[in-house]
């Protein structure tokens, strides 16, 4: 977690449809105040977050609710009264890590009387809840992806009855749209524009644990972003499992492109990012909007998953290899310097050596700036988990290593051409590698560690790139006269 915590109160919270939420928050405040008077310290919480940005954002809501109840945040290493797990189940290794970490806390919970609250995607699965119930008594409250707003009531119920609470909603129900949040970054904020997913890729658990796609009304999204601009946020990342279909469930077409144009008008917001874009829904009007909107960063995450049309069909991705390559060409004609990233799954059921070669070939042709590669992991309840032609683990992992090596070499080569260029960087804070350096990201989403003679934090500054590796760049901030002498860079 970052060093910064920003409390945010949405005006609508005072008008929540659920009086029960207000009552539970109040009751917990009273309990926590009594505790502080008695023991001379406030009760504490810490967060353990896994998975994607959706979970990061949900964790900010959990933090907001807990602070509303009077809990104080502590870091990962400190003991806490409440430990909240926001879980992910996209691959088996994520679940294994979470069980491991919950297991390791048994003693701490016993000694300190701490309670674990477990929420998020993994808890939407009945077999997981059953295992937690039986084998992890230190978990006192279980909630899911659709009922985060119920955390105060569930926690209050546990504390007053000492009966473990398990509450999972199969569907979103009438959850309030806006809840208090404690944002973890002072300059960059996540904004959810749509929850759930309607695509049902055959390997993927997400639609099963996050529900059908539900777009937030554009006015609500804009209201939130205007509020963030007022609080000093510079960059927003719009979140949805497939942002390109934003608004389809509201009966609108091309609403995402319209949203980008609207955000362009909001003073104070300087950068806009979004994820994830499903290739099948990336329209020409979105490509135009990305090109026209100055604030939209020069980066597109466009998961391909496989380079073989046969495998793509079995994955239910609804595009072919040729259509994907054609899309990349069209994007690059409009935005030649755009940075492209992708997700790839290796070892999907039925993947032959030829299919895998097709993936390697596509990766070489596109030349991604970044690629996230995953070994296929069968997920209970998804169609692909029942396919009979699973790829043996040793074959899949040998392919994975080959692809990883190839992509790392390609990405290093691509990064090299940035050496000597001057790029715009939003300075986020001090570098994790070296506290004497500052760190930030380019428009193309590359991490830069750089020297600066004046404090650049929170500003977009120009940085000359001295050295470029596959994963991060090293540079020096341009100041004074040099700034005007440099030609304006192409934004990689
Ligand atoms: N909605 C987003 C993110 C989905 S999860 C999208 O469509 O891109 C993020 C990534 O995890 C996916 O893109 C996919 O590459 C990977 N993934 C999902 N399910 C998986 C599984 N069962 N095994 C391995 N990787 C998986
Ligand atoms: Fe999963 Fe596919 Fe939806 Fe992404 S688009 S969340 S991979 S089902
Ligand atoms: Fe994981 Fe849920 Fe995200 S399964 S990847 S945390 S939507």
Image: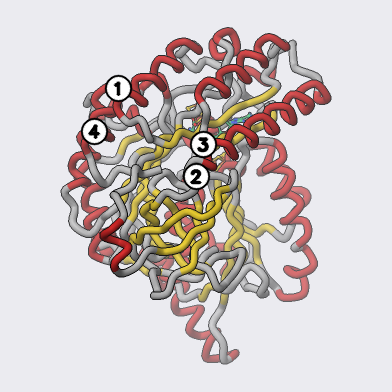
> What is the C-alpha distance between the residues marked 3 and 2?
32 Å
First in residue order: circle 1 vs circle 3: 1
Q: Nearer the viewer, mark 1 or mark 3?
A: 3
Determine the residue positioned at 39% across, 52% down: 422
Determine the residue positioned at 75% across, 63% down: 105
Circle 2 residue: 145
**Callout 3 secondary element:** loop
> What is the C-alpha distance between the residues marked 2 and 1?
30 Å
Compared to residue 187, the image places residue 288 above or below, namely above
- Mark 2 sits near ligand 3, with its Cβ under 8 Å away: yes
| Disc 4 crowd, CA 10 A, few/some/many (<14, 14-19, 20+) | some
Q: Is residue 298 visible?
A: yes
Residue lying at the far right of the rendered structure: 394
Quadrant (top left/top right/bottom left/bottom right) for the N terminus:
bottom right
> What is the C-alpha distance between the residues marked 4 and 2?
32 Å
Q: 363 or 6, which lies in front?
A: 363
Which label is found at residue 369? 3
Q: 333 or 180, which lies in front?
A: 333
| Disc 1 crowd, CA 10 A, few/some/many (<14, 14-19, 20+) | some
Q: Position of residue 165 (x, y in %)?
A: 60, 55
Determine the residue positioned at 42% across, 50% down: 442
Determine the residue positioned at 60% across, 17% down: 361
Q: 144 or 317, which lies in front?
A: 317
First in residue order: circle 2 vs circle 1: 2
Report whether 428 appears left or right of 92: left
Which label is found at residue 283? 1
**Callout 1 secondary element:** loop
> What is the C-alpha distance between the residues marked 1 and 3?
22 Å
Q: Position of residue 490 (x, y in %)?
A: 34, 42
Which label is found at residue 255? none
Circle 4 residue: 289
First in residue order: circle 3 vs circle 2: 2
């Amino acid at each position: 977690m970052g060093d910064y915590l920003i409390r945010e109160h949405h005006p609508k919270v005072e008008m929540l449809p659920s009086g029960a939420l207000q009552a539970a928050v109040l009751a917990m405040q009273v309990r926590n105040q009594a505790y502080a008077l008695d023991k001379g310290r406030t009760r504490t919480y810490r967060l353990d977050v896994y998975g994607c940005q959706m979970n990061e954002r949900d964790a900010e809501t959990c933090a907001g609710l807990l602070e509303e109840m009077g809990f104080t945040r502590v870091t990962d290493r400190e003991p806490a009264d409440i430990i909240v797990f926001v879980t992910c189940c996209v691959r088996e290794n994520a679940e294994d890590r979470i069980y491991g970490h919950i297991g390791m806390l048994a003693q701490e919970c016993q000694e300190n009387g701490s309670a674990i609250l477990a929420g998020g995607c993994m808890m939407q699965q009945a077999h997981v809840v059953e295992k937690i119930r039986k084998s992890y008594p230190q978990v006192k409250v279980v909630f899911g992806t659709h009922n985060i707003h119920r955390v105060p009531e569930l926690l209050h119920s546990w504390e007053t009855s000492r009966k473990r609470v398990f509450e999972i909603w199969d569907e979103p129900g009438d959850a309030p749209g806006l809840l208090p949040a404690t944002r973890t970054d002072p300059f960059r904020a996540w904004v959810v524009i749509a929850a759930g997913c309607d695509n049902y890729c055959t390997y993927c658990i997400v639609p099963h644990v996050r529900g059908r796609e539900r777009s937030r009304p554009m006015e609500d999204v804009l209201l939130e972003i205007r509020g963030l601009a007022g609080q000093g946020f510079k960059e927003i990342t719009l979140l949805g499992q497939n942002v390109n279909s934003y608004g389809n469930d509201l009966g609108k077409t091309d609403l995402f492109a319209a949203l980008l144009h609207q955000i362009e008008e909001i003073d104070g917001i300087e950068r806009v990012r979004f994820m994830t874009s499903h290739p099948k829904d990336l329209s020409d009007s979105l490509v135009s909007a990305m090109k026209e909107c100055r604030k939209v960063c020069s980066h597109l995450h466009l998961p391909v998953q496989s380079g073989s049309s046969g495998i793509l069909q079995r994955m239910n991705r609804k595009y072919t290899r040729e259509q994907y390559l054609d899309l990349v060409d069209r994007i690059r004609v409009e935005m030649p310097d755009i940075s492209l990233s992708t997700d790839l799954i290796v070892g999907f059921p039925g993947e032959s050596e030829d299919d895998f070669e097709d993936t390697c070939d596509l990766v070489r042709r596109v030349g991604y700036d970044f690629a996230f590669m995953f070994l296929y992991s069968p997920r209970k309840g998804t169609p692909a988990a029942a396919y009979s032609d699973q790829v043996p683990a040793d074959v899949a992992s040998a392919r994975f290593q080959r692809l990883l090596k190839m992509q790392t070499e390609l990405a290093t080569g691509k990064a090299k051409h940035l050496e000597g260029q001057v790029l715009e960087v939003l300075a986020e804070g001090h570098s994790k590698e070296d506290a004497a350096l500052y760190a930030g990201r380019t428009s193309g989403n590359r991490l830069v560690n750089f020297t600066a003679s004046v404090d650049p934090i929170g500003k977009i500054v120009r940085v000359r790139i001295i050295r470029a590796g596959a994963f991060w760049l090293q540079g020096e901030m341009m100041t004074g006269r040099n700034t005007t002498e440099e030609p304006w860079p192409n934004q990689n």
